[in-house]
Image (cartoon, rainbow, N blue to C red):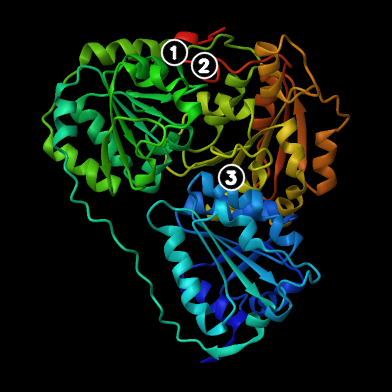
Amino acid sequence: MIINGARILVEELIRQGVDKVFGYPGGAVLDIYDELYKCSDRIEHIIGAHEQGAAHAADGYARVTGKAGVVIATSGPGATNLVTGIANAYLDSVPMVAITGNVAESMLGKDSFQEVDIVGITLPIVKHSYIARDVNELENIISEAFMLAQSGRKGPVLIDIPKSTQKAVCEYKGSVDIKERKLKNNVDLTEAIEAIKASKRPYIYCGGGAISAEIEEEILELSKKIEAPIGLSMMGLTAVPGSYDLNLGMTGMHGRLASIIAQAEADLLIGIGVRFSDRATGNVDEYRKNCKIIQIDIDDVEFGKNIPDIVELHGDAKEIVRNLIDSLPQMEHKEWCDKLLKQKAIDDTPRKPNGFVPRNIIRAINDYVEDETVIATDVGQHQMWTMQHYRFEKPRTLLTSGGLGTMGYGLGAAIGGCVANDNKRTVLFTGDGSFGMNLNELSTAVSQKLPILILLFNNNTLGMVRQWQKMFYEERFSETTLNRKTNYVDLAKAFGAEGESVSSMEELNSVLERGLPEDGPFLLECLIDIDELVLPMIPAGGSYKDLVVD
């Protein structure tokens, strides 16, 4: 059929299985939005309050569904407002297709109104980018973009479509199917198998790549086969149920103590889909001093990037781990595991059983919602408290900004996650600092009637920055005490939501017992002490020897 470029885009999105897109209209994408209007019975568009929020919504949608999220923005400021969202997806390996409009091809390079080189701007933060100058190539470009975003190490792809391409017409075949080049998994497991057999204190360390590879069952089977405890990066937290006894929780700078001890004392570390970032390792020499490291990853760029002298297993993690399981005997490391389980029990013991403190607040919410509930966070102390104390049971139920550490990520992501989960109850843990970044997306949550519980930790400060100032800058609290006069409950009501402020566990439980609205967001402000810290903590560049526990 002969149709214009804008219609080709919409038809190809539908053919790729996209039923929801996020975005914000503008002059350079009017033709695209006109076609979205005509096809609204087949594809739903959700408008955000800001392009950054829409990008984070597409990111959250992708993390929950496992397929590429789509965001659309106009040229110029619309496109540049996507940059943080694209960078966030890139650093966390989230599949996303970002579509921008641009001025007509004849106007490119002339500083035309709302013209910007978005391809050049985003070049370091995408897997690939296109500028679709020829309408005859558009169908191929879109098909290839989705293949790239969703294959290998997943990530964002940008398609910039000039207005002239949107208007031009050509034949749409609707049959282009660009296949992923599969890795040849002829991986020699000999060295890895011998290392595992020789190990007395094995430790499995899983990251976001384990969730992308959908190997939750294989990880549990490997742990049971070799009787090894599991530690998780922040991005990998939902790879293993929180109820599994050998799941020691998050490791790294603000990890659980049992998990930190396990890594420090292990003689073998099996890293699955992790990149060994600085926040996870601290001092690299100390990190690797006592153990041999096996690294399993689909991206060979990660081998040796942060940790040298490893056993490299390059390929599909699911297949590699399955082959390891089949090649290994049943093993026992009872003394090793018993020691760590004792520490895990200590970690789980509340220091203030009845206090209105983050651990108790988070556990109360944890007990209130279902295991399938999608949990989003912003970035800061509340994020680390959530990682330490929330017990995730199901994969793809955590939306958080890991690599980029984006304050303001949470509300947009919660919207995308809620939509992806059939508009079921969703929870956002945020802080007064992060929430202020993109609270305008409350209007989106209200207009979409999304039942998002926004649990706002209000400690009147940029808590994580203050914590560093307290510990490393002799308590010079420069610009971290906020002293804002914002009434967050009234603010929520102004947007059309409901809300309440609480300062005790009794008040919190009373709100939960009354029940939360099912047809819109609810903001629950929790007033906590300004000096609540995230502990334990390994200082930047430090090791287990430098651990701060109180």
Q: Residues within 10 Å of mark 1 (few under 14, many from 20)?
A: many
Q: Residue furthest right?
A: 485
Pointer 3 or 1: first along the chain: 3
Vertical comparison of 489 with 68: above or below: above
Pointer 3 or 2: first along the chain: 3
Q: Residues within 10 Å of mark 3 (few under 14, many from 20)?
A: many
Q: Residue furthest top?
A: 550
SS category of the residue bearing label 3: loop
Which amino acid type corresponds to the residue marked 1 in the rendered image? Tyr
Residue 544 - label: 1
Depth check: give the residue in front, 298 or 503.
Answer: 298
Q: Is residue 530 left or right of residue 410?
A: right
Q: Nearer the viewer, mark 3 or mark 1?
A: 1
Answer whether labels 2 and 1 touch (C-beta < 8 Å).
yes
- Residue at horizontal 65 percent and vertical 11 percent from the top: 471
Residue 425 - label: 3
Which amino acid type corresponds to the residue marked 2 in the rendered image? Ile
Q: Provide residue 215's location: percent of width, then percent of height.
A: 31, 44
Q: Provide residue 252's location: percent of width, then percent of height.
A: 47, 23
For label 2, the residue is: 538
Vertical comparison of 394 with 505: above or below: below
Q: Nearer the viewer, mark 3 or mark 2?
A: 2
